Amino acid sequence: MSNPDIDFSTIIDPKEWKISLSKEEKSLGFSAICESVYAVAGIVVLPNIEQAVSSWTEFQGLMLNYRNQAEGNIKKDLYLIFIVPFIDASQLATVEAIINDTHVCRKICIEQKGRSFNEALNDCGFITTIPSVLDSSERDLSNQASNQGLSEEILNDLRTRSEKTIFEKLL
C-alpha cells in the first residue's frame, strides 16, 4: 500500500526524533514511526490521495494500538502523516474532514508536489529534518552561482531544495 523503502532515518533529525520501523509496521504500510519526548508520528507514503482517504481509519487504529502497546506513549500526542504526490481538488472536502477529525490522533496530509521528502516534511513544522548535504559537484555549482550575483534566497534554494523546485520558482 505505501512505499516503505524510503529511509527516513536519513531525513529526520535523530537528535529530536527516534526513527523506527519494525517488520510488522512496515508490512502494515508505515514508512516510519518517529518518537520524540512529546509525540509519536506515523508516516505513511502513498501513491495517491485516494488511498489515504480509503485507509486513514485503519492507520488511525494502528496508531492507537501503538500508543497502547508502547511504554510511556500514553501521554504523547499522536500524529498520522500521509505524504502523497498530489491532492486532487475534487478530494479537498474529504481530506479536510479527515484532518479535522482529531479523535485518536491528529492527521496531516502533505502534498509532495515533486519536492524531496525532506522538503515535504518541513511542511509539518514540528518534525526537524536533516539539512541536505551537497556533494562536491553541487558545491561547485553553488559556488559558480554565488559568483553570478544570485540572491541569497536562490543560493539557499540551490543548497537545500530539489532541482525541480528551483526550476518552478524561477519560472
Image (cartoon, rainbow, N blue to C red):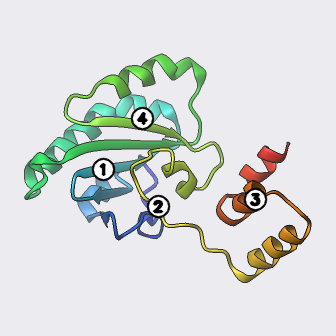
Q: Where residue 52 is drawn, which disc sits there?
A: 4
Q: Position of residue 169 (x, y in %)?
A: 78, 45
According to the picture, the residue beneath numbered tag 3 turns out to be 152
According to the picture, the residue beneath numbered tag 1 turns out to be 41
Residue at image position (36%, 70%) is 14
The residue type indicated by label 2 comes to Thr
How far apart are the alpha carbons under marks 3 and 2? 21 Å
Q: Earlier in the sequence, mark 4 or mark 2?
A: 4
Of marks 4 and 3, the one in the foreground: 3
Q: Quadrant of residue 153?
A: bottom right
Secondary structure category for the residue under label 4: helix
Is mark 1 in CB contact (under 8 Å) with mark 4?
no
The residue type indicated by label 1 comes to Ala
Secondary structure category for the residue under label 1: strand
Q: Position of residue 127 (x, y in %)?
A: 40, 54
Of marks 4 and 2, the one in the foreground: 2
Q: Is residue 142 above or below residue 86?
A: below
Q: Earlier in the sequence, mark 4 or mark 3?
A: 4
How far apart are the alpha carbons under marks 4 and 2? 23 Å
Tell me the crowding category of disc 1: few under 14, some 14 to 19, or many 20 or more residues within 10 angstroms, Cα based: many
Q: Quadrant of residue 143?
A: bottom right
Q: Where residue 129 is drawn, which disc sits there?
A: 2
Secondary structure category for the residue under label 2: loop
